Image (cartoon, rainbow, N blue to C red):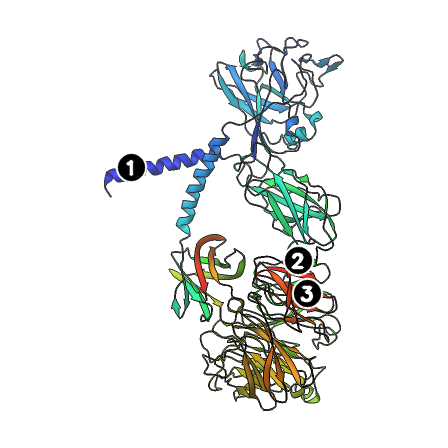
């Protein structure tokens, strides 16, 4: 037999099976994670609550995130407000501790006199809520004339 | 639940659990597992026989045999090697050897797989000799090999099956397969022999050789490098780099790349440590991490100067790129991901010194529309909605310090107005006087903060000045001790006075004005502390204006729907709790809310304010009375700018509203406004800023179409400079010392532009 070194490579055939395996594990893992990270109830209020506000009349919008069924202990919430083009307008970060069954986090988004009103940053915004580093809720928030 | 349903559910759950277990076994590899097989034209193998020590057996099957003491010295061993040169440049994480057992022993045997340490020639090797031409004997007859196992095989008693070794990672030396890949001359192959030779009679295992069907193979789990493209300079402060993942790989193998950079022509050295996630800005070997992608379909990255990355104009850079995965690799030195490839270097790239008018850019983490503040001593400072304070070198955009958020225990929160910088020569702050400039910042959490402009170190934080979760929005105003008269100096010995109004939540009548000691952050006075000044004070959103001549400060506020005064004139000689009203003005205009700051004329005779309804209002500062107003249309944006070059009797007042930029002329004697010009067509203009004093030939204005506009102060005609199409530009700052304009935008970028 010849000892000359010439290579012969073949990819492991079962890679496609592993892709399926990883995908299924991913689904199972997401399902398990979702079970431990309930979605919050997200509301936007400026006197009255809604999802669309006029920049000419809105004063400050309270972004309320109500949690139920969270595991007790310390948590970290990050609220990210994105402009219609996807740029990040502002972030709010809050550490909170669950001792009872529910908790509400409120962040105030100034509108009157802010860049939103002064520079006409209108359109469909996105509000994304992250709990302990994971995206758990995403909703639209509109600013109109 | 019906019992049948419960049973069905139970079966489903059991099946899922079983599948999980199977799948966990299946996902024991990430990276790429590449099979390297021997063949008639690749690799080498042979058997050696203790009883025929000079005989060579390089055809037929590979034999491993144990004999008994009754037939001593008749053991067989097999040697074999694989050509791994095709894996050059890969990072080996784990390996396994597969052998096809064509004939099993009658009783299961354990076979040792070890690394040979002396070279051999396939068609010459024997029990005694490594080769015969020239003659070379084994140091240890029967093969010289490592003293510890690379792995073992358990043969079982079934023929016609493939046996797979355990994980080959090391044999108590190093990751020797990696060494074989990196230096093929060290790849001397394996030896396979019975763990208990001479203990049983004729326990023989026959394996397929490389010339037969099912030849020996090696499964090597590796991470290969990307093919990296040539980097290109996108701007003086940004580089683009593209890559392609190894041919044939998929998202099951790689989930992204980590990129490091170093200035100069030498690529950053060092390999990321498996199991460690690197963040942007982190040191990696001789470089700094500038990108860490997280998807297989991301094939390029724009690397920008900013908070964590330093890309400077006119500078040469070289990059290194490492692929990574996100899945555990059982048996690897680091089971946990990510695992990294060895890295590949890019070619060098040199950024331009400028691109048109663009000198540099700096990326922050969120919208930044406040006017950046040049310090006058080489630094530009700004905040933004990313809750951080940013400091940039005025010439290159290099960060002066890692962005600060106020230190442990508190945060800056959003900074939505320009920061105030007091030069070292003028500040009374004992740490910074004649040493460092001081930055005063109004923060979204209701505190006022002072920082060193050179290091970012915090000098002090005031108490929380707001209530109900309120914020401080407007820039702090500073009355400097050095520039003030004896009355002030007698009251405030020896410190600068910082003045700020609150933006309290929950009420339109509960706001206050604070005077703060610039040395310590302690409260000097608290105007409307008891909230008894009827009819109350609505929120302040802008910077006060200090009148040194009268030791007073002007503030503008909202009006609670027109019910309350929105212009306030407060003495700066106050102290303690002040609950009696200072002069204030209820405007006569239909719109009384004022979001922008007031502007005092050069003689301190008239104060000009811009209401949210687009009214320019002139106020007599001696009598604290409104004397004239004119409506220019649209929603007022920010504060008035004054043109002092018209005549002694005429002041030009320029404002922005949602309909454009407008100039009106104010007759100081007649106390009337007359038309100037209207620059319409600039979408959502920012507060204008004048070009160099005293000429004031132009005004610069940001817009919502990504252009910076240059407006003639004479007639309102304008030209534009595209900066970042499609985004909203903030209020520019004009730096007379460097002839640069600094401006931010909603994408979080800060730009330095040569004046045009």
Sequence-wise, the earlier of marks 1 and 3 is 1
Identify residue for label 1. B8
Tell me which chain the residue with mark 3 is part of: B
Identify residue for label 2. B361
Which label sits in the foreground, 1 or 2? Answer: 2
Q: Name, please, the residue furthest toward the bottom.
A: B623
Residue B381 image offset from top left, x and y in percent: 66, 66
Which label sits in the foreground, 3 or 2? Answer: 3
Q: Quadrant of residue B401?
A: bottom right
**CA separation in Å, label 1 and label 2:** 62 Å
Q: Are marks 1 and 3 in contact (CB under 8 Å)?
A: no
**CA separation in Å, label 3 and label 2:** 12 Å
Crowding at dot 1, Cα within 10 Å, few <14 / some 14-19 / many 20+, comes out as few
Sequence-wise, the earlier of marks 3 and 2 is 2
Identify residue for label 3. B741
Local secondary structure at mark 2: strand
Q: Would residue A73 appear left or right of B365 to someone viewing this image?
A: left
Instruction: Look at the picture and state if A35 lies above or below B486.
Output: above
Asked whether the viewer can see residue B523, the reply is: no
**CA separation in Å, label 1 and label 3:** 72 Å
Instruction: Look at the picture and state if B240 lies above or below A93.
Output: above
Residue closest to the eye, B726 or A105: B726
Instruction: Look at the picture and state if B246 lies above or below B463.
Output: above
Which label sits in the foreground, 1 or 3? Answer: 3
Residue B10 image offset from top left, x and y in percent: 31, 38
């Amino acid at each position: 037999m010849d000892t000359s070194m010439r290579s012969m490579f073949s990819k492991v055939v079962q890679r496609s099976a592993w892709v399926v395996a990883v995908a299924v594990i991913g689904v199972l893992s997401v399902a398990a994670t979702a079970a431990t990270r309930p979605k919050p109830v997200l509301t936007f209020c400026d006197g009255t609550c809604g999802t669309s506000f006029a920049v000419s009349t809105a004063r400050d919008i309270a972004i309320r995130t109500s949690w139920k069924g969270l595991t007790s202990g310390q948590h970290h919430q990050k609220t990210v407000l994105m402009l219609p083009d996807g740029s990040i307008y502002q972030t709010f970060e809050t550490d909170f501790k669950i001792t009872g069954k529910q908790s509400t986090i409120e962040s105030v988004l100034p509108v009157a006199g802010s860049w939103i009103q002064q520079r006409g940053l209108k359109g469909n915004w996105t509000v994304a809520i992250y709990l302990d580093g994971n995206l758990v809720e995403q909703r639209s928030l509109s600013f109109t004339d | 639940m019906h019992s049948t349903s419960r049973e069905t559910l139970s079966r489903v759950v059991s099946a899922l659990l079983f599948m999980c277990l199977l799948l966990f076994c299946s996902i024991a590899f990430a990276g790429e597992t590449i099979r390297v097989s021997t063949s008639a034209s690749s690799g080498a193998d042979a058997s050696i026989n203790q009883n025929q020590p000079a005989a060579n057996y390089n055809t037929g099957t590979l034999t491993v045999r144990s004999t008994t003491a009754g037939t001593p010295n008749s053991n067989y061993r097999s040697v074999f090697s694989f050509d791994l040169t095709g894996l050059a440049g890969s990072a080996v994480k784990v390996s396994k050897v597969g052998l096809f057992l064509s004939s099993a022993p009658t009783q299961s045997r354990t076979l040792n797989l070890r690394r040979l340490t002396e070279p051999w020639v396939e068609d010459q090797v024997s029990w005694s000799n490594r080769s015969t031409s020239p003659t070379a004997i084994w140091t240890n007859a029967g093969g010289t090999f490592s003293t510890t196992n690379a792995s073992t095989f358990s043969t079982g008693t079934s023929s016609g099956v493939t046996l797979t070794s355990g994980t080959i990672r090391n044999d108590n030396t190093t990751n020797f397969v990696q060494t074989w890949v990196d230096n093929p001359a060290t790849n001397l192959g394996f030896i396979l022999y019975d763990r208990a030779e001479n203990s049983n009679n004729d326990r023989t295992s026959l394996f397929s050789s490389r010339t037969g069907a099912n030849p020996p193979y090696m499964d090597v789990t590796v991470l290969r490098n990307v093919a990296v493209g040539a980097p290109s300079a996108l701007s003086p402060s940004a580089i683009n780099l593209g890559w392609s993942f190894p041919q044939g790989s998929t998202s099951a193998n790689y989930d992204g790349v980590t990129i490091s950079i170093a200035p100069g022509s030498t690529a950053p050295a060092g390999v990321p440590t498996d199991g460690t996630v690197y963040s942007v800005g982190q040191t990696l070997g001789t470089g700094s991490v500038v990108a860490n992608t997280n998807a297989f379909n991301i094939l390029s990255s724009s690397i920008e100067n900013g908070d964590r990355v330093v890309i400077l104009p006119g500078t040469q850079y070289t990059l290194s790129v490492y692929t990574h995965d996100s899945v555990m690799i059982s048996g690897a030195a680091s089971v946990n991901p990510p695992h990294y490839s060895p890295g590949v270097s890019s070619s060098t790239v040199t950024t331009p010194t400028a691109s048109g008018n663009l000198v540099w850019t700096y990326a922050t983490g969120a919208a930044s529309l406040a006017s950046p503040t040049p310090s006058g001593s080489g630094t530009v400072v700004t905040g933004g909605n990313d809750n951080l304070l940013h400091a940039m070198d005025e010439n290159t955009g290099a960060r002066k310090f890692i962005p600060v958020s106020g230190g442990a225990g508190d945060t800056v929160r959003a900074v939505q107005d320009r920061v105030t910088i007091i030069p070292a020569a003028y500040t009374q702050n004992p740490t910074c006087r004649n040493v460092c400039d001081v930055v005063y910042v109004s923060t979204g959490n209701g505190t006022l903060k002072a920082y060193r402009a050179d290091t970012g170190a915090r000098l002090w934080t005031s108490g929380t000045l707001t209530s109900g979760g309120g914020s401080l929005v407007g820039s702090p105003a500073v009355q400097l001790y050095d520039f003030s008269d004896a009355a002030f100096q007698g009251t405030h010995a020896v410190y600068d006075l910082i003045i700020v109004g609150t933006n309290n939540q929950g009420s339109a009548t509960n706001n206050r004005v604070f005077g703060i000691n610039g040395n310590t952050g302690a409260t000097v006075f608290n105007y409307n502390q008891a909230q008894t000044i009827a009819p109350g004070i609505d929120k302040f959103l802008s910077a006060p204006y200090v009148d040194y001549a009268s030791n007073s400060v002007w503030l503008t506020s909202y009006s609670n729907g027109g019910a309350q005064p929105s212009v306030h004139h407060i003495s700066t000689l106050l102290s303690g709790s002040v609950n009696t009203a200072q002069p204030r003005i209820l405007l006569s205009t239909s719109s009384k809310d004022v979001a922008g700051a007031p502007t005092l004329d050069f003689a301190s005779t008239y104060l000009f304010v811009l209401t949210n309804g687009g009214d320019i209002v002139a106020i007599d500062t001696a009598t604290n009375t409104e004397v004239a107003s004119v409506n220019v249309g649209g929603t007022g944006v920010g504060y008035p700018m004054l043109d002092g070059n018209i005549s002694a009797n005429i002041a030009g007042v320029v404002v922005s509203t949602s309909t454009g930029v407008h100039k009106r002329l104010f007759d100081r004697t007649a106390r009337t406004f007359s038309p100037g010009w209207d620059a319409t067509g600039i979408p959502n203009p920012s507060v204008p800023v004048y070009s160099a004093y005293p000429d004031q030939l132009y005004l610069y204005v940001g817009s919502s179409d990504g252009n910076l506009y240059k407006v003639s102060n004479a007639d309102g005609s304008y030209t534009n400079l595209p900066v970042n199409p499609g985004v909203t530009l903030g209020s520019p700052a004009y730096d007379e010392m460097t002839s640069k304009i600094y401006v931010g935008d909603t994408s979080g970028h800060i730009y330095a532009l040569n004046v045009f």
